[in-house]
Amino acid sequence: MARVLVAYGTKNGGTTPIAEKIGETLSGRGHEVDVLEAGKARPGGYDALVVGSAIYAGMWRRPVKRLMGRVLRTAPDTPLWLFHSGPLGDTADEPQPFPKWLASLEEHLDVRDRATFGGVLDEHATGFIARKMVQSGKGGDARDWEAIAAWAGEIADALEG
């Protein structure tokens, strides 16, 4: 059994259930899991880290960027899985590029895998662009719960292997 931190950043709340699903899957496999917003997460003392963010215009949420700096300083050798969520429509299932700033950190971290998950944008969305997308019919929920659980299962397999 591993102690795992699942930390995430969200703007409109759609990434929270993704992180919770990952945590639920890992817990179901017997791991001790903390699911926390990135601003409340401290990476030290865990056997593995799963860090994710909503992605808007190719950018991650600021609290996640700060958390990644803490990971680099305090837990660079901890196995790390990264994900982001946000694509909608025809691109929801396609891997999206990870932010360039993250690539410069990755050479100093033990990144095991990366995943892109579809996002959600509904009538509760905040921000001008998000509201306009919903108003123009480009919103929706593209989260694939089976794919999310499968990816979390792969993490559990790696921790148990």
Image (tube, grey):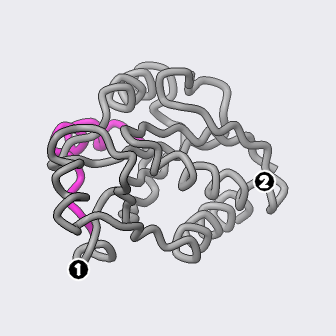
Question: What amino acid type should be assigned to the residue bearing mark 1?
Answer: Asp
Asked whether 79 or 5 is in front, the reply is: 5
Say which of marks 2 and 1 sits in front: 1
Quadrant where the C terminus is found in the figure: bottom right
Residue at (22, 68) in percent of width and height: 137
Q: Which quadrant of the structure image shows residue 86? A: bottom left
Check if residue 22 falls in the magenta segment: no
Q: Which mark is residue 90?
A: 1
CB-based contact (under 8 Å), mark 2 and mark 1:
no
Asked whether 53 or 82 is in front, the reply is: 53
Distance between the alpha carbons at the discs numbered 2 and 1: 32 Å
Give residue 148's position: percent from left, percent from top.
54, 67
Q: Is residue 73 left or right of residue 94?
A: right
Position of residue 72 relative to residue 5, above or below, is above
Residue at (78, 53) in percent of width and height: 27
Position of residue 43 relative to residue 161, above or below, is above
The residue labelled by disc 2 is: 27
**Residues shaded magenta:** 95-109
Packing grade of label 2 (10 A; few <14, some 14-19, many >=20) is: some
Give residue 30's position: percent from left, percent from top.
84, 56
Check if residue 107 falls in the magenta segment: yes
Residue at (56, 42) in percent of width and height: 49
Question: What amino acid type should be assigned to the residue bearing mark 2?
Answer: Ser
Q: Secondary structure at mark 1?
A: helix
Give residue 116's position: percent from left, percent from top.
36, 63
Give residue 80's position: percent from left, percent from top.
49, 46
Q: Secondary structure at mark 2?
A: helix
Residue at (79, 50) in percent of width and height: 31
Packing grade of label 1 (10 A; few <14, some 14-19, many >=20) is: few
